Image (cartoon, helix red, strand yellow):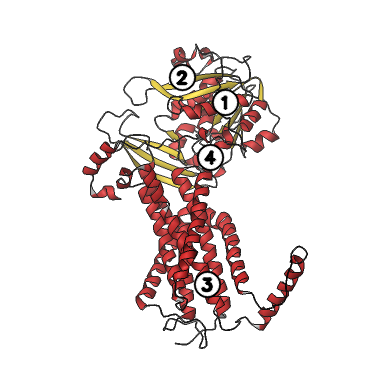
Amino acid sequence: MKRLTTPSAQTSLHAITFLVAFCSFTYELAYSELLTVMYGGTVTQYGLTIGIFFSSLGVGSYIAKQFDETRPENVFRTELYLAFTAPAGLLFILWINTAAVPQLLPEILLALLARLPVVGIGVLSGFELPLLLALVKNLDSPSLSLRMRWMTNGIDRVINTLVGLLFHTSDSSSEYDTYSTVLAMDYLGGLISALIYVFVLYPSVGLIVSVFVLALINAAAALFFTCRFSSRSWGVLATENRDIITHEQTVVFIITIVLTATLGGAVVSYRTVDETLTEYYLEGNIEQEYPPETVNVEITTQFTTQYQHVVQYNRSWTGSSKNPLFSGQTERCLRLDTAIQVCDSTARPYHSGLVDVPLSMYPNTTDTDVLLVGGGDWIALDHLRRHNVSVDHVDIDAEFMRHAKTNPFLAEYHDDAYTYEHAQTYQADIYDYLQRTDTQYDVILLDLPGAKTDDLLSVYSTQFYRLLGDSLTETGVIATWGYSQYTYPAHQKAYFNTVSAAGFTQYQSYYAYDDYNGDGQAVRGERFYLFAPDTSRPIITPANGTQYVKKYRSQYESKQWHPIPTYRGVRPNTLFNPNYEMLIDTQRKQAPISDRFERLRNMTVSDLI
């Protein structure tokens, strides 16, 4: 077979070093983000993953001394194994967090199993640098061209002069230094990988497909290595006189071709791959607040904006008892990331509680100024329109707001509220907006996601609530929804201490009410809070409210301002000293071991996946 024009052996090995370092460092970022999605806590997951990955690199480097330096095909096999392990590890983590069988295991064991792919990738990545260093070191002679050698020697002289200002240096050797150059390519690959992953790969194809792209690069590196150095017929880039010769088996080479083609197909069809695997995970994890086998989920729409993952789905009651959640067997819901945003059963009562109840405290005229934070689904704005007040609406996600305008499900509830003539919508970060504006508001409505990830802790901080307080009129209040103090007591204590530290002293609490499941009985729904810096604020006035507030006037007319309780030994949450007690976990708690064994006996084949 005709040999093609190829780069030198040393240049080829440096290029491979760059590629494998690119993949290894990016795997670290991708798996850190994946485990954050699964278990929450960005700092915790990134810290654990980076620590496990680097320790595994050390283990791999130590094991690599057992390898035969005369068998360079070990480099080829390492890249092949990485190309398989990385996507397989991703699928494994999805499986243990979704399928029924793994849920029978103790939670601590599941958490340990989820880290095994990180260990595997770290150990395999630890093989790479020692193997490549050994190959470069064993080259019989420098294989750089005269021009390249002249260039690198010139760079070395400049660096030697600069470093010599601070350290003792030597210029006794002007040859291309093996170890420092290979290490430089390794670290350069790490830098480039971080930049490309953060600014190109992850925003373009998402987390799941990023892993498949990296695995494809590993497979391509394996193919390039064997085509450059193989003694067999597929060594189309090999030269006649070469220091490195590989003799890999035909079956292994064929496996590499098949794996590369499979990964290439996954990358080409990245939208299908991403949607399929995301739906698999979401359908197994959405509505985990409820007992097993009571709520079934079917994803109907999902996409990712710059700021969040949007999921619309149908949930159906499949339990043996009467449906306590909603009327009928099925309803539509929408989630932003992991937080539920709106369902058919809650859309009206939730927004009535958030908007109509506090607006009963103020005149229904354009002289009443309202700041709506969040609310990109436009439903809260529809309720504000009924009060004929002036509204400044601030939401950071313009893409979701555009989607919500024409989404049939949401349009049923917002009734084109984005056309309201007394509202001005700003696509902006709320911190930036509050720091720029001088407007004072009578009511500030917080229609924000719950504190489920530490990315959201900034809008549950003392700094945020101080900015809100500075934007209130002398009689202004803040209205927001909140979690139950009985279900999430640690969150409640941290939240109240945070709001209190921001200068608020008074609060009211109340609930939304409705006949959620159609049985003719109105029951309590979402909980809400009103916060004020002093007692000179109006109270809820049902007579001035909407039909909803008047209907449930007995629940609201006796509400009064009370001092905000504070708790000893509980830190407020701040931007630079976060209190992770503020985070809440709505995942279903693991059943007792006896119940898990009973479920195991009743499992079918479908439960395996």
* Rendered location of residue 59, percent (x, y): 47, 61
Which residue appears at 65% of the width and 21% of the height? Answer: 367
Among the two numbered marks 4 and 1 on one chain, the one whose residue lies closer to the N terminus: 4
Among the two numbered marks 4 and 2 on one chain, the one whose residue lies closer to the N terminus: 4
Binning the other alpha carbons within 10 Å of mark 1 as few (below 14), some (14 to 19) or many (20 upward) gives many
Amino acid of disc 2:
Tyr
Mark whose residue sits in front, 2 or 1: 1
Observer able to see residue 129:
yes
Q: In this view, does 365 lie above or below 134?
A: above
Specify the quadrant of the image occupied by residue 569. Answer: top right
Residue that mark 2 sits on: 548
Residue that mark 3 sits on: 132
* Rendered location of residue 239, percent (x, y): 51, 85
Whether tag 4 and tag 1 are in contact, CB under 8 A, the answer is no
How far apart are labels 4 and 1 at the CA level?
18 Å
Amino acid of disc 1:
Asn
Q: Residue 497 carries which label?
A: 1
